[in-house]
Image (tube, coloured by chain):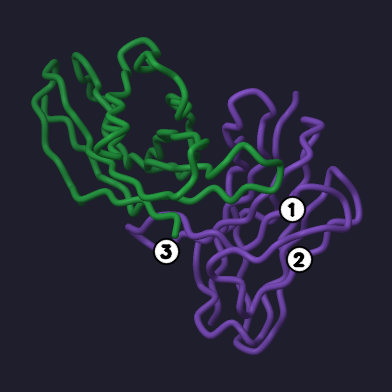
Chain colours: A green, B purple
Amino acid sequence: AQKITQTQPGMFVQEKEAVTLDCTYDTSDQSYGLFWYKQPSSGEMIFLIYQGSYDEQNATEGRYSLNFQKARKSANLVISASQLGDSAMYFCAMRESYSSASKIIFGSGTRLSIRP
Amino acid sequence: DGGITQSPKYLFRKEGQNVTLSCEQNLNHDAMYWYRQDPGQGLRLIYYSQIVNDFQKGDIAEGYSVSREKKESFPLTVTSAQKNPTAFYLCASRGTDTGELFFGEGSRLTVL
């Protein structure tokens, strides 16, 4: 069955440090997509980064990079040079298969707090 | 501007009443999704739909119903059968490129 696991309920990081948020997944599909979203206290969901299962290179978007280790079924988010505005909930998500009617499920999230 | 519009933003209802949450999109996306979020928790999938007049149950569909009569609209009804309906509800549509979800601002339902 499709499953996403985020084992860090909360993290505290000093401003300007790099931080890694863990995500492991389980799927029997060969084709799938992995996503990271940020949810500030306002509740909006902000898309950060995407990794396809067949992508050979790790995805990067500005200060965000996705450390994709397919054999370990992990898709960790790395935020470089953290900023106070990075304080938020972060969710890992997976879309199983590339079929049109695919489910998209989310992990339980990690609350990241940046210390000044 | 293109996007997802959810209404109402806040809703209070008495126990035992059905409630319908609206979700409209003008992004011309085929797939739409409904999620429930409880405080400090992740998003759980309620229903999703790929095309008009077709939808599938997610992981927590009991006590909810949906319809998809138009491509732009995917309303969610929280029925009296839902045992604990107080939650934050998020609607999304799925882009066709990477398949990322575009979310509305959410509807916060409180059952008194």
Between A82 and A48, the one nearer to me in the picture: A48
**Residue nearest the observer in this picture, A98 or B92:** A98
* Chain on which label 3 sits: B
Callout 2–callout 1 Cβ contact below 8 Å? yes
Looking at the picture, do discs 2 and 1 lie on one chain? yes
Front-lying residue, A52 or A37: A52
Residue B5: x and y in percent read 71, 42
Q: Earlier in the sequence, mark 2 or mark 3?
A: 3
| Letter of the chain that mark 1 sits on in the rendering | B
| Mark toward the viewer: 1 or 3 | 1
Query: Residue at coordinates 53% horizontally, 66% vertically from top-left?
Result: B59
Q: Where does residue B42 sit, x and y in percent of width and height?
A: 39, 55
Image position of B15 with respect to A76: above or below? below
Question: Which residue position holds label 2?
Answer: B66
Q: Label 2 to label 3, Cα distance in Å?
A: 20 Å
Q: Measure the alpha-carbon separation of dots 2 and 1.
A: 9 Å
Mark 2 or mark 1, whichever is nearer to me: 1
* A31 or A116, nearer to the observer: A31
Residue that label 1 marks: B49
Near mark 3 (Cα within 10 A), the count class, few <14, some 14-19 or many ≥20, is few
Q: Of callouts 1 and 3, which one flags the residue occurring earlier in the amino acid sequence?
A: 3
Residue drawn at (59%, 37%) of the image: B101
- Residue at mark 1 shares a chain with residue at mark 3: yes
Residue type (three-letter) at the residue carrying disc 1: Ser
Quadrant in which residue A86 is drawn: top left
Residue type, numbered disc 3: Asp
What residue is shown with label 3? B38
